[in-house]
Image (cartoon, grey):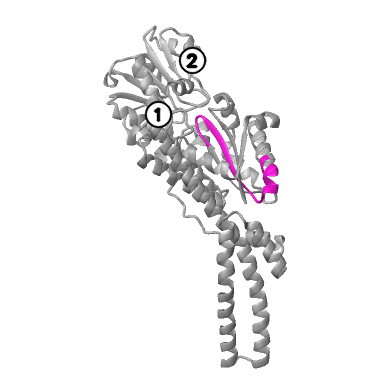
Amino acid sequence: MVFVSLVASHSDVDLETVARLSAGASEVASGALDGTGPVSGAVVLATCNRYEVYAEARSDEDIEATRSTVISEIAELSGLDEQVVSSALTTLTGKDAVNHLFAVGAGLDSAVIGEREIAGQVRRALIEAQESGTASGPLVRLFQTASRTAKDVGSRTALGGRGLSIVSVALDLAEDLRDDAWAEKNVVVFGTGAYAGATMSLLQQRHAGNVFVYSNSGRASAFVATRGGTALTDETLADALRDADVVIGCSGGDHKLTAGDLAETGRGDAPLVAIDLALTRDFDVSLEELEHVDVVTLESVRMAAPAEQAAALEEAREIVLTAADEFAAEQRERSADAAIVALRKHTQRVLETEVERVRAQHGCTAAAEEVEFAMRRMMRQLLHEPTVRARELAAQGRSDEVETALSNLFGISTADVAAANRKAPRQKPQAAPAPAPAAMPDDAVHARHRTA
């Protein structure tokens, strides 16, 4: 088993490319698992500034085939050429993939270093994969460990105390552009997804008193019932836009607010701050051409994100590296499990043969039962030391020596070990609680991304 991750993020490609890759993100994992290919499991992490697919390949020899399978699926669902998809995605394998996910979950690879929203996105990515049946046992353990590592970074370093996020930095930019108190501003929020929920929470912390919410799917009323604010309809939206001081886009819907839409409201040249947090943009570029409108985009947030203190960042990275090393050691130990299962199956067959011979000679007598009991006890004792040694060798990265020994001593082939690996029971992961209905996105883009 080997982890393979295909990564496209804000640090490598432009956000428009990330958005195009993300089309059909929710179907990529299930599409890559056709039951006959090299992919044993897959989890998709899609946010406002990254698109990543984590897959489990059966062996090192299957890495390239796994990569090709995932790329083909992304290309088919996004409508992009496979070569375009391939060139946009960076491939990481093994420990590199583990290190990357742990760093991402801890907010060390975010546009806003240390932001906490990504940790929730990592959790939801796993929940969705578990619900759709694409998360294999190793991937479940990988993502659960990434979440625990993110908590450690948040509780043990100064990064956790900053409370920074993409939304908070965007609101800070809005304050710099218009220094009026939030209590005096009229704010219109587009969307009712998880990102809109995070926005509402931060607006409440800043004592915003006049917040209006619009959803083209009609969910605004249910949304404001639990988060505050006033729901807008198609009929009341224009009046709210006319009086707005700040508009915040969190929906990523098909319709984009244009300069013409603002003009039709009759607001004239009244100053406006437009914060566009949707990956596929809620606000048309024509707004940027209006002198009285200041537009804050995800790119603006990335440019304005504060640099973290070197000591806190170094401490966070050390936590991530240590967690990745420990996880890798655990995985190496687990790699011996298949060999151990194969050995036990082999000895079980030998034991059953001898037990049947004893039964044939002595029948179902007390003596036969005593002999069978003694044989089974002896077999358990004989297997104890090889089991311990196999796990120790695997922890040292010497699993191949275990398989070679089994082949030379017992005639157990690599194929037998692979078969045991496929049939070995996996610990059933406990399902995490589903997100609250109010946190569900209201449009196609955030239905794919489930951003926090």
Residue 400: image quadrant is: bottom right
* Three-letter code, disc 2: Thr
- Please report the residue visible at 29 percent of the width from the left and 29 percent of the height from the top: 205
In the rendered picture of this protein, how many numbered marks are placed on residues? 2
Residue 313 sits above or below residue 389 on the image:
above
Name the one closer to the observer, 22 or 260: 22
- Magenta residues span 46-67
Name the one closer to the observer, 408 or 47: 408
x, y percent for residue 316: 42, 38
Badge 1: residue crowd in 10 Å (few <14, some 14–19, many ≥20):
some
Which residue is denoted by mark 2 in the rendering? 258
- Please report the residue visible at 66 percent of the width from the left and 37 percent of the height from the top: 71
- Please report the residue visible at 65 percent of the width from the left and 66 percent of the height from the top: 342
Residue 112 sits above or below residue 286 on the image:
below
Q: Nearer the viewer, mark 1 or mark 2?
A: 1
Which residue is denoted by mark 1 in the rendering? 308
x, y percent for residue 379: 59, 77
Badge 2: residue crowd in 10 Å (few <14, some 14–19, many ≥20):
some
* Three-letter code, disc 1: Glu
Q: Quick check: is 410 in the magenta stretch?
A: no
Residue 217 sits above or below residue 352 on the image:
above
Q: Quick check: is 63 in the magenta stretch?
A: yes
